[in-house]
Image (tube, coloured by chain):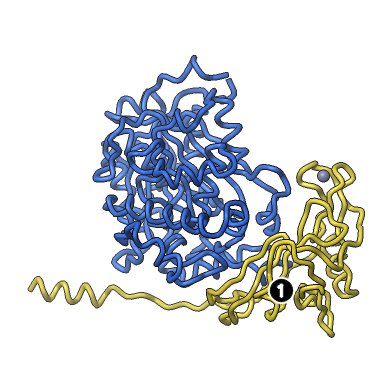
Amino acid sequence: MAENIQKIAAEELISIQVINSIDYSFSTGPIMGKWFQGLKEKKFYATKCPSCGRTMTPPRGCCALCVVRSEDFVEVGPKGTVVNYDIAYYASPDPLTGKVRKTPYSALFVMLDGSARDIFAHEIKDDDIPKLKRGVRVRPVWNEVRTGSIHDLLYFEIDG
Amino acid sequence: MSQKKNRNVGIAGIGMTEISSHKENQNQPEMINEAVRAALADAGIALRDIDCVIHGNMELFEMVHQPDMWHVIGTGALEKPSFRITTGGTTGMTLIAAADNLVASGMYDIVMAIGFNKLQEAGSTTGGITNMADALWYRHLQTGALTSTSANVTIEEIGEERARRAAMKYRIMMDKHACLNERAHRRLGLEYDQIENLMKNSPPLIGELRLIHMCSQSDGACAMILASEEKAKKISKKPVWIRDHIAIHREETASNAYFPILSENSHRVAARKLFARNGITNPIEYFDVFEMYDPSAWWGIEWLRDFLLLDGDQVIKMVEDGEFDLDGKLPVNPSGGVTASNPISATAMLKPAEVALQMRGDAGRHQLKREVKHGLASGFGGVMWTELMILEKDLDWQGDNNG
Ligand SMILES: [Zn+2]
């Protein structure tokens, strides 16, 4: 009897499988809009804080450190110096596509030339992953077709 | 006096579920209720004695929105004032900080805080965390909570071999603590003679970060009952006092987490300010235990340096010398830490909960041999923000150290 109750109880512990797929659309606002327009033209636009002088990439309309508006744009890069990096071997799902990412892939943290106290993050070309080091010089590689998105920049590659 | 507490606040009840990789035998409100009932039993009070309920999790994992609403049958918040709090990995500590504020202000006498996540239901925590990143540009890069950037810096500072060895020693020390904690999720039975083997053979996740270094993904809930001094003394035989806490946020742009725009990270700023306003000049001497939110062994060795305001390789030396062991100079994470147990929004709450259990002498097999009078607990979340809390066994700090 007790065994039977246990069996029924086990049968009633069910897990419901759910896969969500929802479309989103995010507004850039004018400051990030200028950034994406810049990518279309193969340019990196940063904002510069009028108080502390640091640049912000991608641009922000306010310096969070000084709490002042920063709406003046300066062009930085296109080359830069690697300040840190990650090389991912773990095949995590890409939430933008739902597909498992090809590994290894990189996250690259780069100080674009002319920047002050802020960095930009993107990827490095797969072939250059083994050569990644802090301090290495990199240059951007642009997509042929540019639409004003982060994918207008394909990746960085080692310069030299 | 920098804290503006109208009155003292004590931890009067602690309840937690067992932490494990899966709990198919319970749904979310059932799991929460187990912790709630345990906390009420520990305090020796009933649901009708609770004035206010604060509920918290990272809903992006389970994707059940407004959980505070769906979970009323588990939390017992029916017709009570109730708030929901979500601050990333910090959630569990923010819940306790908020409960402390609510009681200290005089608004409520007895507040129950509940933190939980049921990550097995989430499918992929890395997918969830990636969706948290800035939608306009950073999502295509975000690697979940996995990063090797701090390892890269530590290696540059002290050399590959010494850094890798210290990180693995720290990881094995955490496992040794976890093995004594019957509530811990991962208890692997690692030994120090496995350092070399694990340094080579644990599967690499990202850069220098290997599977063995990284925190677990767990199911579990924790509930804590905070009460005014008067009520805490009445309902609990061993109330533990929350002396002070501080939250330090950073401008969150994802990329700046990996590059020091300011000379100190949020942990070091939190520690410097909190210790200064409480007159604590030597945290290693002052504290008897530190429960630190350590998402990976690499972050563990880096962040200990920041929280304890150490410089250069002082912290590495302390790891090498076993100074953070249960019988060391400053025992760190007797619970086994986050690499052992990580039901994310309960995780940071398990830190002050463990400190309180140590002070009460109720920790169990991993109870420290020394008397635990002064404790420190930390939470971490988002790209880089910190919650840091001082707990005291006795109400005797006032008047001396309020500088
Ligand atoms: Zn500024």
Chain B hue? blue
In the displayed structure, does residue B285 sit left or right of residue A3?
Answer: right
The answer to which image quadrant residue B323 occupies is top left
Q: Is residue A123 visible?
A: yes
Q: Chain of mark 1?
A: A
**Is residue B361 positioned above or below B31 on the image?**
above
Residue that appears at 40% across and 35% down:
B329
In the displayed structure, does residue B44 sit left or right of residue A109?
Answer: left
**Is residue A126 positioned above or below B165 on the image?**
below
Rendered yellow, the chain in question is: A
- Considering the image in quadrants, where does the N terminus of chain B appear? top right
Q: Position of residue B105 (x, y in %)?
A: 52, 28
Q: Position of residue B76 (x, y in %)?
A: 37, 48
Tag 1, which secondary structure?
Answer: loop
- Considering the image in quadrants, where does the C terminus of chain B appear? top right
Q: Which residue is mark 1?
A: A124
Q: Is residue B85 visible?
A: no
Residue that appears at 36% across and 75% down:
A15
The answer to which image quadrant residue B324 occupies is top left
**Is residue B43 positioned above or below B152 on the image?**
above
